[in-house]
Amino acid sequence: MQHPAEHSPLGKSSEYIATYTPSLLFPISRAPKWAELGLTAQSLPYAGVDYWNCYELSWLTASGKPVVAVGEFAIPAHSPNIIESKSFKLYLNSLNQTRFASRDEVQALLARDLSAAAGAPVSVTLKTLDQVTEEGIARPAGVCIDVLEVDIDNFSQPQVELLRCNADEVVEERLYSHLLKSNCPVTGQPDWGTLVVEYRGAKLDHANFLAYLVSFRQHSDFHEQCVERIYLDLLNLLQPERLSVHARYVRRGGLDINPYRSSQAMSVDNRRLARQ
């Protein structure tokens, strides 16, 4: 079956448009992928947000002087649509030769257009390069499981049967791995990420969990759906009191995508990691 993004600019030659063109944004409904996971908009077992960070954002002042900034866009996980990443980049490029009276005008415009595409309010923050420098580079908290040995030879799709837990032992822990990789479902290009899990519930077998993550290596899906699949698989296995899953993906085309999913309200640290 054809992927909805087949109709988007993704994987196609695209004209570079340098003046404001909001019609470049290409929304993709979340509903089909939710349905694959047995979900509907009314039955989502998580709250969350997709943080997009743009490092190639520029526009002109009223006098024609260029301005550069880093954009932070927070798209609610329950929004009806995601925004296809290449269309997002093309839209942002359309600001390059467009004049604006102020930074506030740019921020309000971005929030309006992105909210319309996503179908829900999108929060927009424009940061100076000094601000981003002061924030620095973060590192995940918790236990890195990448040193564990695993034996796996099937990389074509997530192997949920690899997951194991000890139902007799309840723990509270935070784990992370830098070995998450999947592929774009349209172009086949690799998507690299760091996956972080925090939970209280039956003790997860760390080595088997790492093998499960590695099994995503040739799986084709968007960032958001990979994180949601991992969240649901852990939810079904652990039956946890609480669970949070997020991924920090390596940027492509000046954009990085960072989906967060949680059973409860969570505090999000949106500082970039070393590979971002």
Image: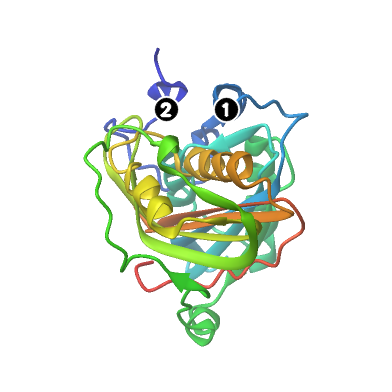
Q: Is residue 196 above or below residue 134?
A: above
Residue at point 69%, 51% (across, down): 240
Residue at point 67%, 32% (across, down): 80
Q: Nearer the viewer, residue 275 or 168?
A: 168
Expressed as whole percent of the image width and height from the top left, the position of residue 117 reads 63, 36
The amino acid type, in three-letter code, at marker 1 is Leu
The amino acid type, in three-letter code, at marker 2 is Ser
Whether residues under marks 1 and 2 lie with C-beta atoms below 8 angstroms apart, the answer is no
Expressed as whole percent of the image width and height from the top left, the position of residue 208 reads 40, 51
Residue at point 66%, 44% (across, down): 77
Q: SS at mark 2?
A: loop
Q: Would residue 67 appear left or right of 109 to someone viewing this image?
A: left
- Specify the quadrant of the image occupied by residue 107: bottom right
Residue 160, can we see it?
A: yes
Number of numbered markers: 2
Closer to the chain start, of discs 1 and 2, is: 2
Spatial CA distance of label 1 from label 2 is 23 Å
Extreme residue in the top direction:
1
Q: Which residue is mark 2?
A: 8
Q: Which residue is mark 1?
A: 37
What numbered label is drawn on residue 272? none
